Image (cartoon, rainbow, N blue to C red):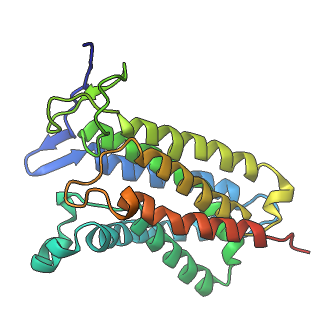
């Protein structure tokens, strides 16, 4: 049986003494920097929701929201028992372990506080923020693939299946790449299409709702190909943790889009 060999790439790009620059860290940096640059353009579109200087200030807030929320989400959603027994390891972010849904909640809280302090329209500002999020997701999923982690389920009959290091001898779906395409490229294209329409931009909260609903759909579909976390397995009705956490996103996204009305 033909199996595509996994392209083994060292997770560490450069190592100088104790300093190691990892692809995963570069993925976060690339996502934040490129998202920041695009957001500077988006906030200037009519209706104008903030200044570019305020977006510059917001970068620090969103970075903290991603890191703190992502780590806390992983601790609470995926391994609460382990970290309850080893609480100090919850701070060891260099050991890996970040959850998208936790990072999303962290960004939502950071955005809410930032908008309150700066007296900015929360939903309109949030529309511009979420429109650039798929950029970070794209690079993050590529980094997952390079690290050979979060691999897919066994797929012996799929011609592009791969044998991942540490996942046993069976060929598996390269589910990280599926998620790269759905959560990163496709979702970004959808949000940019919506953002290009003045009538949609004039309905605060619609694009934020489209992001939540779109990501929820993409994540639920992607989880059908991704191997569940070994310490969790399948949960209620055979669903994975990622699918269960995405259900509230679908509901919140649909509600935001339904209630979005043009601003007079």
Tell me if I can see residue 51 in this picture: no
Image spot of residue 16 (x, y percent): 12, 44
Nearest the camera: 60 or 85? 85
Nearest the camera: 244 or 189? 244
Quadrant of the snapshot with the C terminus: bottom right
Image spot of residue 67 (x, y percent): 35, 66
Check the image and name the residue furthest to the right. 264
Nearest the camera: 112 or 164? 164
Tell me if I can see residue 193 in this picture: yes
Image spot of residue 74 (x, y percent): 30, 67
Q: Residue at x 14, y 35 (%)?
A: 168
Where, by quadrant of the figure, is residue 53 drawn?
Answer: bottom right
Judge from the rendering whether residue 77 lies leftward or rightward of residue 53; answer left or right: left
Q: Residue at x 45, y 37 (%)?
A: 178
Image spot of residue 230 (x, y percent): 20, 54
Check the image and name the residue furthest to the front. 237
Judge from the rendering whether residue 150 lies leftward or rightward of residue 254; answer left or right: left
Judge from the rendering whether residue 94 lies leftward or rightward of residue 234; answer left or right: left
Quadrant of the snapshot with the N terminus: top left
The number of numbered discs placed on residues in the rendered structure image is 0
**In the picture shown, does residue 103 fall above or below 149?**
below
**In the picture shown, does residue 6 fall above or below 193?**
above
Nearest the camera: 173 or 10? 173
Q: Residue at x 53, y 71 (%)?
A: 57
Where, by quadrant of the figure, is residue 205 drawn?
Answer: bottom right
Check the image and name the residue furthest to the left. 17
């Amino acid at each position: 049986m033909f199996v595509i060999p996994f392209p083994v790439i060292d997770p560490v790009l450069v190592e100088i003494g104790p300093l190691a620059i990892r692809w995963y860290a570069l993925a976060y940096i690339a996502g934040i920097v490129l998202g920041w640059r695009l957001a500077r353009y988006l906030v200037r579109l009519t209706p104008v929701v903030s200044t570019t200087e305020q977006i510059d200030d917001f970068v620090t807030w969103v970075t903290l929201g991603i890191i703190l929320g992502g780590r806390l989400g992983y601790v609470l959603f995926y391994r609460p028992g382990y970290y309850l027994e080893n609480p100090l390891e919850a701070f060891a972010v260099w050991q890996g372990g970040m959850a998208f849904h936790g990072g999303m909640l962290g960004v939502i809280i950071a955005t809410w506080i930032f908008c309150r302090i700066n007296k900015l329209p929360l939903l309109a500002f949030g529309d511009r923020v979420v429109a650039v999020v798929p950029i970070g997701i794209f690079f993050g999923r590529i980094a997952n693939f390079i690290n050979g982690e979060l691999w897919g389920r066994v797929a012996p009959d799929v011609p592009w299946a791969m044998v991942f290091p540490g996942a046993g001898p069976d060929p598996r779906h390269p589910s990280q790449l599926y998620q790269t395409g759905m959560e990163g490229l496709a979702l970004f294209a959808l949000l940019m299409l919506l953002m290009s329409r003045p009538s949609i931009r004039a309905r605060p909260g619609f694009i934020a709702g489209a992001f939540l609903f779109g990501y929820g759909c993409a994540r639920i579909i992607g989880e059908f190909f991704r191997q569940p976390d070994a310490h969790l397995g399948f949960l209620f009705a055979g669903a994975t943790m990622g699918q269960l956490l995405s259900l509230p996103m679908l509901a919140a996204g649909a509600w935001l889009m339904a209630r979005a009305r043009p601003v007079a």
